[in-house]
Image: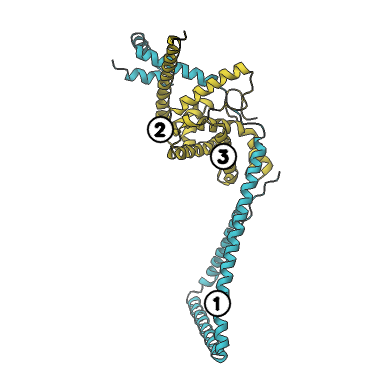
């Protein structure tokens, strides 16, 4: 016997049409399998309806507050460790760099000073050439300085806002006040 | 209070929710007070163990607290919260399946805080055991859909939104779950009858 539409109807929560219901009832009268399925589903529904919701044991909120405080403390410790590690790494790189420079200074001070003077001079030349280039560029497009200024200020402001938001979200963790 | 006797989740005061969204921990504590029961119940129905349910419910509120900035005010808060709980429980069940621990092997503890007398408590625990067994016959996603539909009267749309699936997928999952639960019930009854018959046919009788 084909039970397919009847088992669909039996478990469906959509209301049947009068015609469908008539056909279904007729089938049900002669089909033990569908009767069994209907009885089982009916019992399941009754059981679910009368089974009460389960509540947690008393003090749930306090336990949650403790858990949150512990989680926040753990996060802060992790952030502190990361900041410390970054600081140590930066300091190590700086010390290494200064060490190398210092050894050069101690070995031949005159050569060291000359080398740095040359580097400063090349830096000055670079800055000067960039400045000249920008001046020439702005002269050829008289509108650009003003627009560029507005855009630059806008970009810098946006970056500041983003930075502050990121700091607020990531670093300043909300403290839970008991 | 947001949870009434008919297992439906009502809406909390909008002012409390607004305060919680602004980062007020006191307001969020009120949300925890108000929603602890539906969240715990969902976790218990999903995981079948009170200790795991407690852990999952606590984790749900921690995640909600951390993710308040991502909460969409257009959505119902209870749907959002129960969605976090359901997804967490689904993940836990997946991990549990990976470590080959079935629901049957979890300790059969009495559900907490039911509060009636010893006789009623016994019959209630028997019913809770039956419910646990029925829900245990379902996949984690189907189980979440069933709990939301039958315990919280969520609409198909709300379940679809909470479980990130289509409405037709929800209907299909619920239909499959009903069939599985009806079959599981039938098998349980047959086993119980067989056991009873064996008991009376034993030489002691």
Query: What subunit carries mark 2?
Result: B
Q: Tell which chain the image draws in yellow.
A: B
Closer to the camera, A101 or A168?
A: A101
Q: Give a yes or no on whether discs 3 and 1 share a subunit.
A: no
User: In the rendered view, does B167 fall on the left or right side of A49?
Assistant: left
Q: Residue at x 37, y 10 (%)?
A: A25
Q: Disc 1 to disc 2, how far (Cα)? A: 62 Å
Q: Disc 3 to disc 2, how far (Cα)? A: 25 Å
Query: What subunit carries mark 1?
Result: A
Tell me where residue B166 appears, x and y as whole percent. 42, 35
Eye-nearest disc, 1 or 2: 1
Label disc, if present, on residue A107 of the rendered structure: none
Q: Are marks 3 and 1 in contact (CB under 8 Å)?
A: no
Find disc 1 in the rendering and name its residue. Answer: A97
Query: Would residue B22 be seen by someone viewing this image from the given angle?
Result: no
Tell me where residue A168 appears, x and y as whole percent. 62, 55
How is this picture coloured? by chain
User: In the rendered view, does A81 fall on the left or right side of A18?
Assistant: right
Label disc, if present, on residue B60 of the rendered structure: 3
Query: Would residue B64 be seen by someone viewing this image from the given angle?
Result: yes
> Taking A123 as reference, is B191 above or below it?
above
Tell me where residue B13 appears, x and y as whole percent. 65, 34
Find disc 2 in the rendering and name its residue. Answer: B169
Q: Quadrant location of residue B192?
A: top left
Q: Chain A shown in which color?
A: cyan
> Taking B31 as reference, is A153 above or below it?
below
Mark with earlier residue (3, 2): 3
């Amino acid at each position: 016997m084909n039970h397919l539409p009847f088992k669909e109807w039996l478990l469906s929560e959509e209301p049947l049409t009068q015609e469908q219901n008539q056909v279904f009832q007729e089938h049900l009268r002669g089909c033990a399998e569908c009767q069994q399925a209907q009885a089982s589903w009916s019992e399941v529904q009754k059981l679910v309806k009368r089974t009460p919701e389960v509540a947690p044991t008393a003090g749930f909120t306090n336990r949650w507050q403790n858990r949150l405080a512990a989680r926040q403390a753990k996060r802060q410790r992790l952030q502190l460790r990361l900041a410390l590690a970054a600081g140590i790494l930066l300091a190590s790189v700086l010390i290494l760099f200064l060490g190398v420079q210092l050894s050069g200074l101690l070995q031949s001070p005159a050569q060291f000073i000359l080398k740095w003077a040359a580097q400063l001079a090349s830096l000055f030349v670079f800055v000067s050439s960039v400045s000249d280039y920008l001046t020439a560029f702005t002269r050829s497009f008289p509108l650009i300085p003003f627009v560029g200024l507005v855009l630059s200020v806008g970009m810098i402001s946006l970056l500041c806002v983003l930075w502050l938001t990121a700091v607020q979200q990531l670093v300043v963790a909300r403290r839970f006040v008991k | 209070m947001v949870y009434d006797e008919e297992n439906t989740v009502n809406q909390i005061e909008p002012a409390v929710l607004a305060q919680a969204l602004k980062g007020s921990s006191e307001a969020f504590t009120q949300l925890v007070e108000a929603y602890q029961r539906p969240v715990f119940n969902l976790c218990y129905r999903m995981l079948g163990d009170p200790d795991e349910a407690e852990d999952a419910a606590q984790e749900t509120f921690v995640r909600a607290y951390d993710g308040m900035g991502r909460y969409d005010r257009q959505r119902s808060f209870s749907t959002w919260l129960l969605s976090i709980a359901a997804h967490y429980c689904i993940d836990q069940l997946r991990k549990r399946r990976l470590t080959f621990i079935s629901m049957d092997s979890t300790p059969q503890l009495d559900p907490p805080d039911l509060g009636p007398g010893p006789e009623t408590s016994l019959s209630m625990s028997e019913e809770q055991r039956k419910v646990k067994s029925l829900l245990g016959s379902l996949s984690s996603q189907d189980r979440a859909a069933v709990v939301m539909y039958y315990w919280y009267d969520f609409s198909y749309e709300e379940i679809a939104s909470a479980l990130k699936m289509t409405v037709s997928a929800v209907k299909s999952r619920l239909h499959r779950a009903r069939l599985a639960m009806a079959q599981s019930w039938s098998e349980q009854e047959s086993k119980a009858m067989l056991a009873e018959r064996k008991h009376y046919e034993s030489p002691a009788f």
